[in-house]
Image (cartoon, rainbow, N blue to C red):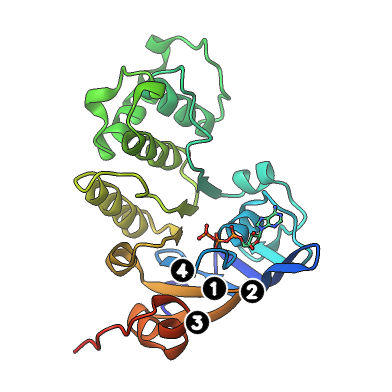
Amino acid sequence: MQTNSTQPSLSTRDLTIRFGGHVAVNAVTADFYPGTLTVIVGPNGAGKTTYFNLVSGQLPATSGKVLVGGQDITRAGAARRTRLGIGRAFQLTNLFPNLSVMENVRLAVQSRAGMGLNFFSIWSSHKELVARAEHYLERVSLTAKRDALVGTLSHGDQRKLEVAILLALEPSIMMFDEPTAGMSVDEVPVVLDLIQSVKSERNKTVLLVEHKMDVVRALADRIIVLHNGTLVADGNPVEVMQSKIVQEAYLGTPEPAHA
Ligand SMILES: Nc1ncnc2c1ncn2[C@@H]1O[C@H](COP(=O)(O)OP(=O)(O)OP(=O)(O)O)[C@@H](O)[C@H]1O
């Protein structure tokens, strides 16, 4: 497994959740490091989104632990986890559809700057915030649509905006659930390049749930495979993609050997 730092920024220890008799995430232990992008793969219903929910605090663990920088946050709510640096791009649920693209990003920048979500703040007194918001819009290629109402954007543009908002919040741990879902072919590289560059330039810990194998290959430093809630493989992409368990459990067809 690749590690760029000795201290993990995020860890789970035997993390488990049961829904009635069903164990959706079963004793998952993993460490995540700054500057490393880990892709979590697995068949439908494997527990990927539930694992994300346990890490970001949307669901309470039945047992096990979540640690950020070594601090046990298992009992912390989602808001506290956000303050501790866990940021998650939710699938379009954290956008304000009746505000413009720029206003959405400005609110995120403002929130990061500790000024709260004040809708009535005066633009001219916030040149710095606007400049930063513009920077994030440019990074996701949405500058031309800055004044459009978010509700009128295409699905792909909304997903890009969501990435801009996550960047603006500057979390140290960034979680993306299928970030390119619903995007057109030409939009996909913009987001993939961005996630890649954020990871390396800013030394972020990035976790990604992804189904598309071309995206996994393009981005992953490390792959974790979940199957029936259990971690069945964890390691560098070449090893994991070629492992028997992945071939059988997930990929279905043999992955060609790499030179
Ligand atoms: N709130 C819940 N109540 C009961 N069962 C749940 C709940 N959330 C998830 N599950 C179950 O837990 C299992 C894991 O679901 P999860 O959505 O995490 O899988 P996934 O790997 O993300 O799948 P997909 O790739 O289809 O999104 C499934 O069997 C699902 O039905």
Local crowd size for mark 4, using a 10 Å CA cut-off: few (<14), some (14–19), many (≥20): many
Q: Is mark 4 within 8 Å of ligand 1?
A: no
Mark closest to the chain's N terminus, 2 or 4: 2
Local crowd size for mark 1, using a 10 Å CA cut-off: few (<14), some (14–19), many (≥20): many
| In the displayed structure image, the side of residue 91 where residue 256 appears, left or right | left
Alpha-carbon distance for marks 3 and 2?
Answer: 11 Å
Q: Amino acid at mark 1?
A: Leu
Q: Amino acid at mark 3?
A: Ala
Question: Is 119 in front, or is 172?
Answer: 119
Could you say which disc has been placed on residue 233 in the image?
3
Could you say which disc has been placed on residue 226 in the image?
1
Residue 239, by quadrant, is bottom left
Could you say which disc has been placed on residue 28 in the image?
2
Q: Amino acid at mark 4?
A: Val
| SS of the residue under disc 1 | strand
Residue 95 in the image: above or below residue 45? above
Q: Residue at x 50, y 12 (%)?
A: 121
| SS of the residue under disc 2 | strand
The C terminus lies in which quarter of the figure?
bottom left
| In the displayed structure image, the side of residue 231 where residue 103 appears, left or right | left
Q: Is mark 1 within 8 Å of ligand 1?
A: yes
Mark 1 near mark 4, Cβ–Cβ under 8 Å? yes
| SS of the residue under disc 3 | strand
Question: Is 162 in front, or is 155?
Answer: 155
Mark 2 near mark 1, Cβ–Cβ under 8 Å? yes
Q: Is residue 2 visible?
A: yes
The N terminus lies in which quarter of the figure?
bottom left
Alpha-carbon distance for marks 1 and 4?
Answer: 6 Å
